[in-house]
Image (tube, rainbow, N blue to C red):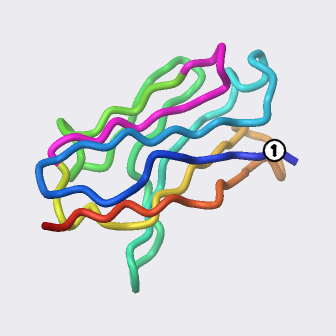
Amino acid sequence: QVQLVESGGGLVQPGGSLRLSCAASLSTSTFSIYTMGWYRQAPGLQRELVASTGIDAGRTYKDSVKGRFTVSRDNAKSTVYLQMNNLKPEDTAVYYCNANLPFTTNANYWGQGTQVTVSS
């Protein structure tokens, strides 16, 4: 079982920044082949993909966060980050880290979630 531990959430004013971290209980070599993603879920809404980074360090983003959020990974630390700038009230949600091993059954793991609240 893979453990994912998120940190960095909190309360921030509109226009502010936060950096989320997610540390995985994986060796560096194993971590490097996982696709790592950040999802979020606001009250009453479905969980949605915010950003992800794959084995080739390619990155994908939800349209509404492009230019504001940056996903990155440090394979040597088995950690993935989400830098969030120019935060808006609509970014308020619980943010979840996800680890997925492509083309592998039962290799999809979630963190416990961290709350991000954007409010003045």
Q: Is residue 78 magenta?
A: yes
Farthest residue toward the right? 1
Q: Residue at x 43, y 53 (%)?
A: 9
Residue 76, position in %: x, y?
A: 66, 13
Q: Which residues are magenta?
A: 74-86
- Classify residue 110 by image quadrant: bottom right
- Classify residue 117 by image quadrant: bottom left
Residue 79, position in %: x, y?
A: 60, 29
**Up/down of 78 relative to 91, above or below:** above
**Up/down of 53 relative to 118, above or below:** above
Residue 114, position in %: x, y?
A: 51, 59
Q: How many residues crowd around disc 1 within 10 Å: few (fewer than 14), some, or many (20 or more)?
A: few
Front one among 78 and 30 = 78
Q: Is residue 96 left or right of residue 70?
A: right
Q: Which residue bears the numbered disc 1?
A: 2
Q: Residue at x 40, y 86 (%)?
A: 44
**Up/down of 2 relative to 43, above or below:** above
